[in-house]
Amino acid sequence: MSVRAVEAARAWIGTPYVHQGSARGAGTDCLGLVRGVWRMIYGHEPEAVPAYTPDWGETGGTELLWSAALRTLRPVPAEAPEAAGEVLLFRMRPGAVAKHLGIRAGLNEAASFVHAYDRHGVVESPLSAPWRARIVARFAWPDQGQGGATRQD
């Protein structure tokens, strides 16, 4: 599953950033990227997505993205080895709601992740120390039987 998730994520590189979008080549945000990779792997959306704000600095709110990830993905324990294909959840500022997602692509010296970034679109970025410090949770994709039928877009 992990190699497949990385290949699917990399297929989105170059897609422009569009808040609440999830269309490869046309526009997506970080959640839309993960939703699009999910569709490429399983063939359908995991659940309906309500409207959400683009504000990374949002404070005092409910961890909606984290809760949704817990419903659809498998949490990875902090002590587990890093694995390509993991969905990473980031908190961009202390005290803010965790509102950024990426998919781990490279490991070790080539550590990287694919994410949709405002004004940059979908890119593969080095998983540098500042990015690593913002990771609050890691998730694995569910087994095929849990996600549904396989389909390639």
Image (cartoon, helix red, strand yellow):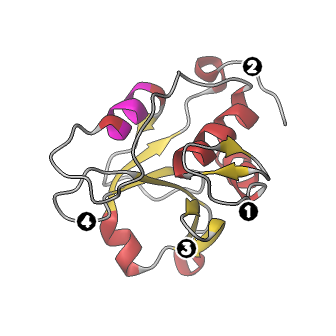
* Of callouts 3 and 4, the N-terminal one: 4
Is residue 116 among the parts visible in the rendering? yes
Q: Quadrant of the N terminus?
A: top right
The residue under the point 82% across, 28% down is: 151
Distance from label 4 to label 1 (Cα)?
25 Å
Disc 2 marks a residue whose amino acid type is Ala
- Residue 142, magenta (yes or no): no
| Amino acid carrying mark 1 in the image | Ile
Q: What residue do we see at 62% from left, 48% from top?
A: 33
Is residue 113 rendered to the left or right of residue 76?
Answer: right
Residue wearing tag 2: 149
Q: Residue flagged by tag 3: what amino acid is it?
A: Ala
Q: Which mark identifies residue 13?
A: 1
Mark toward the start of the polypeptide (2 vs 1) = 1
Mark 4 vs 2, N-terminal side: 4
Q: Position of residue 37 (x, y in %)?
A: 67, 42
Residue at numbered disc 4:
93
Q: Is residue 128 above or below residue 71?
A: below
Point out the stretch of residues depicted in magenta: 65-71
Residue type at mark 4 is Arg
- Horizontal side of 42 relative to 71 (left or right) equals right
Q: CA distance from mark 2 to mark 1?
A: 24 Å
Q: Earlier in the sequence, mark 3 or mark 2?
A: 3
Query: Callout 2: few (<14), some (14-19), or many (20+) C-alpha neighbours within 10 Å?
Result: few
